[in-house]
Image (cartoon, helix red, strand yellow):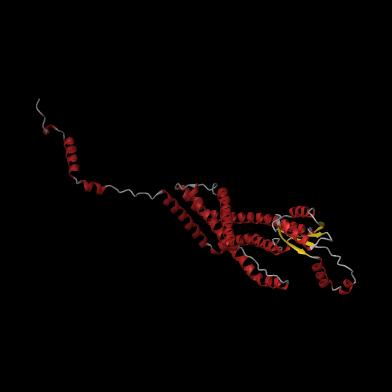
Amino acid sequence: MARRTGHGATPRRRQRRSGGWAQRLVPRTRRRRDRPRSRRAPPAPLLYLLRHGQAAARALAWARSAPVHSLLTAAVVGIALALPAVFMLALANAERVAGGWGAGAPRISLFLEQDAGTETLQRRADAIAERPGVAGVEPITPEEALAAFRADSGLDAALELLDENPLPPVLVVTVEPSLSPSEVSRLADRLAGTEAIARMRLDQAWVERLHAILALAERALWSTGALLALAVVLVVGNTIRLTIESRREEVEIVKLIGGSNGLVRRPFLYEGLGYGLLGGGIAWGLTGLGRWSLAGPAERLAEAYGTAFTLSGLGLGNGLLLLLIGAGLGVLGAWTAVARHLAAIEPR
């Protein structure tokens, strides 16, 4: 059968064939050059950081647009955070004055039998010093006790009339500052039952009163801190609510073009974070200023009582913790406001 020539082809077929040849004649590099180039998206972690950076920049721009309002909000947050911080410092310094108990730790006086000699006194002091919970033991002979009484009382003439020394040997036991009043009481009872001890005396009433006062102050500190933390959350939440209302049209536009709730929420959360951090810094500065103003009078008072005492401040660790607490409360306040009011805004 004879092969058909191209004369019998229709014009459309010829056009298709010629077009195909034309496409084949176009250089391959030219065809690649004419294709639209697709931009490669950045990696997911970098894109995540970029979006958060944009949200933080937007929140900073909002704060800069109303600087007085932003500074007043941060100042309120700072004062609310400074009050429990100052209370905590006052309690810590009070514990240091009390010795933590330190120098004011309770002492147990152990009176030995009247006929106990110096050797027995020293042996009992060495044995008691090895017991757990004992910080130190001071043996006092009858002669030393009489000399101290003579110097303190000024009754030299009356003491000369005594035929013999009526004072017994004494062991003054200083307990560890970490022991609680109940542990001190049990230790005193055990020491009272040891060999050659005739009588024991423990003046612990003031220690129990001191611990009761410190426990009450600590409970008040936690209660006050919780109330002021709630106040910080409410202040930041109310500020973010006002910001949401002022940016209502912007939020509607972002949602209208398909923006997610997370995209809309981020700038407000960063604004709350900024209020918390700035408020924490203000609180840190206020506590440092208060310590600086009271350091001189406290040192002069300590010198009047013959002790060396300086007020302690927050320090770097507690200061950073204060910033972290402020940031957390700021984000919490912003989150509560956003979760409540942002869901009610929908594009019309």
In the figure, is residue 337 to the left or right of 190? left
For this rendering, which residue is in front, 330 or 337? 330
Res 78 quadrant in image: bottom right
Query: x, y (%) of residue 316?
Result: 57, 62
For this rendering, which residue is in front, 330 or 343? 330
Res 328 quadrant in image: bottom right
For this rendering, which residue is in front, 39 or 247? 39
Instruction: Answer above or below: position of 178 versus 288.
Output: above
Q: Residue furthest top?
A: 1
In the figure, is residue 157 to the left or right of 230? right
Query: x, y (%) of residue 242?
Result: 57, 55
Instruction: Answer above or below: position of 129 versus 43.
Output: below
Res 98 quadrant in image: bottom right
For this rendering, which residue is in front, 295 or 192? 192
Asked whether residue 92 appears in the rendered view, the answer is: yes
Residue, x 63% and y 55% (percent of image)? Answer: 229
Residue, x 81% and y 73% (percent of image)? Answer: 151
Query: x, y (%) of residue 249?
Result: 50, 52
In the figure, is residue 174 to the left or right of 315? right
Q: Residue furthest left?
A: 2
Quarter of the rendering occupied by the N terminus:
top left
In the figure, is residue 244 to the left or right of 192? left
Query: x, y (%) of residue 129?
Result: 71, 58
Asked whether residue 279 appears in the rendered view, the answer is: no
